[in-house]
Each structure stands twice: as structure tokens, then as C-alpha cells.
Image (tube, rainbow, N blue to C red):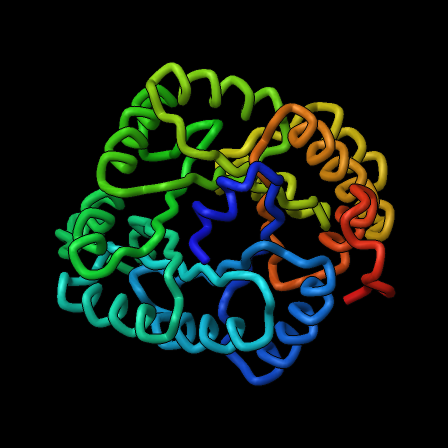
Amino acid sequence: MRISELLARGTPTVSFEFFPPKTDVGRASLLRVIERLSQIGPDFVSVTYGAGGSARTLSLDSCSEVKSVVDGEVMAHLTGLCHTADDIAAITDHLWESGIVNIMALRGDRPKDLDPEAVLHGFPHAQEMMAYIKTRHDFCLGGACYPEGHKETPDISTGVEHLREKIDSGCEFLVTQMFFDNDAYLRFMDLVRAAGIDVPVIPGIMPISGFAQLDKFENQFGVRLPTELRNRVLANEGDQEAIEQVGIDWSAEQCRTLLAGGAPGIHFYTLNKSASTVKVCLAMGLAGAVGNPEA
């Protein structure tokens, strides 16, 4: 089923994001995580793609394997940067033949080891790849958005203009980068709707699970941490279990408020772990039969 059809039902969706494991141990661990999270009954799950396509085979293999063990739909991520049209054609043909009809179409990050002055070939913008994919097969395309802005975009309004281009290129729904301040999502939605963009915008949520994440979220991803959340984590420095509970409580409240306010669903960034995500879902009343959530 197309994710756009799931969203059109009017019932909030629940979805999980994984990344392709690089080792047999990681693969076995991910399958255990997927088994636990499958008990929640996700509407769909997504599998990420390496920067510049570095994890192309892993991503495609993982999509096929995940599809064989979950009841919900599988969405493959696909990045356009550093890929030629022939590459994208081959990948999308493979996905279509595998029965995967949902794609999160992204530009992708510039590979870290690439000369900053190098000219990248392929699709420099997600909307260009979206338009090309639509000439191959009738995929349901999702796109990324950034409620607090993207590091390469001068301001949020410019980012919203780019979203309009994605919609015009065939994008049917959007998933946000993680955020911890619901007001940021609400302000962003005001801008999106004012721009005439009416597709569903699914909030992306990631429970804080460690002290070191504080600076990483802000410095690497440009995600603002509310003072109250930062203070709660700082107050429990050195107590990993307490910090994880802070993250669970905060995310659960975020989700409850977002859904009460009309959000079309919740997309959890799992980091290939189940414990915190399951506990958030339990707190929301979504996982009564999961059993032991530890992973």
C-alpha cells in the first residue's frame, strides 16, 4: 500500500526508521529490534541510505529483508547526490520489482572525504530526482523537511519554497527532521500551509538516550534543545538510566501533544534500538502487548 493511502485514512500513523547494519552481528540485532517493534503494529518502516550511495547494496538488501518480516509497508530511502540517472533507474527498477512502492527521496549529504571544490554529478536537489523517478514508475514519494531550518538553507522560508518544488515534482508527504520543541513544528506548519502546501507533514521524534547527544543534536544537526530538557538531562549526568527516562518522558509528551493537535502520525528515529521507542509507545497506549521492551 502507498503511504499516501495510509495517511488518507485519517488515523494517525506510527512508523519507525532503521539504518542498514554492516555486520552479521548488527543484522541479527536489528532483526530482534524489528521483531519487538513489529508488535506495536507500525503502519510503515523506513530503511536509510548511505551518503553518496556508500551503503547501496546494504540498503537494498535490508529493504527486502525487512519487508519479509514486518506486516506494515516498507519505505526505501534513496539519495540522488553522486548517482547518475542510470544508477537511479537501476535502483528504482529493483525496488519496484521487489514490491517496494514507497521511496523517501533525498538529495543526500556530501561525502565527508570529498574535496569541497569538487563538482558533484547526479541529482543536486531532491526535487530533480523525484521528477525523474516519476518517469520510471509510479512510486509514492516522501520528502524531508526541517522545522528549525537546514544548515545549507539561509532561512526557513527559503526551505519552504524548496518544499513547494518537491510537491510539484511528485512528493506526496513529508517527514520532519527530529525536533524537541513542538512550537517549532507548529510555527513551521503555519509557514507550510500559508505557502499552499497541503500534503501531510509527519513529525520525526527521537528520544534522547545519552548525555553526549546534547551537543551533537545542536552542533551537528542544528536542532534546538529546550532549556527545560537540557536542564533535566544535566541534572542526571552520570546516570544513564535516568537520562533515558528523561528522554522517554519528554518524547511521550511531545507525541501526545502533537497527535492531540492534529499531527498525521509519528515517525520514530530508532537508531536500530527498541527500548526507548517501545517505552514511548507504551506511555502513549500504543504497545500494550509488546512485553519486555529492553534491547
| Placement of the C terminus among the 4 image quadrants | bottom right
Q: Could you tell me how many numbered marks the image carries? A: 0
Picture layout, residue 141 above or below residue 161: below
Q: Nearer the viewer, residue 250 or 241?
A: 250
Q: Is residue 4 visible?
A: yes
User: Could you tell me residue 196's position as x and y percent?
Assistant: 34, 20
Residue at (86%, 65%) from the top-left corner? 292
Where residue 86 sits, quadrant-wise, is bottom left
Residue at (55%, 20%) from the top-left corner? 186
Q: Is residue 237 visible?
A: no
User: Could you tell me residue 69's position as x and y percent?
Assistant: 59, 75
Q: Nearer the viewer, residue 44 or 84?
A: 44
Residue at (34%, 25%) from the top-left corner? 160
**Left of 213 or right of it: where is 286?**
right
**Left of 7 or right of it: where is 101?**
left
Residue at (84%, 61%) from the top-left corner? 289
User: Could you tell me residue 148's position as x and y percent?
Assistant: 48, 27
Among all residues in the image, which is located at the extreme front? 9
Among all residues in the image, which is located at the extreme bottom? 24
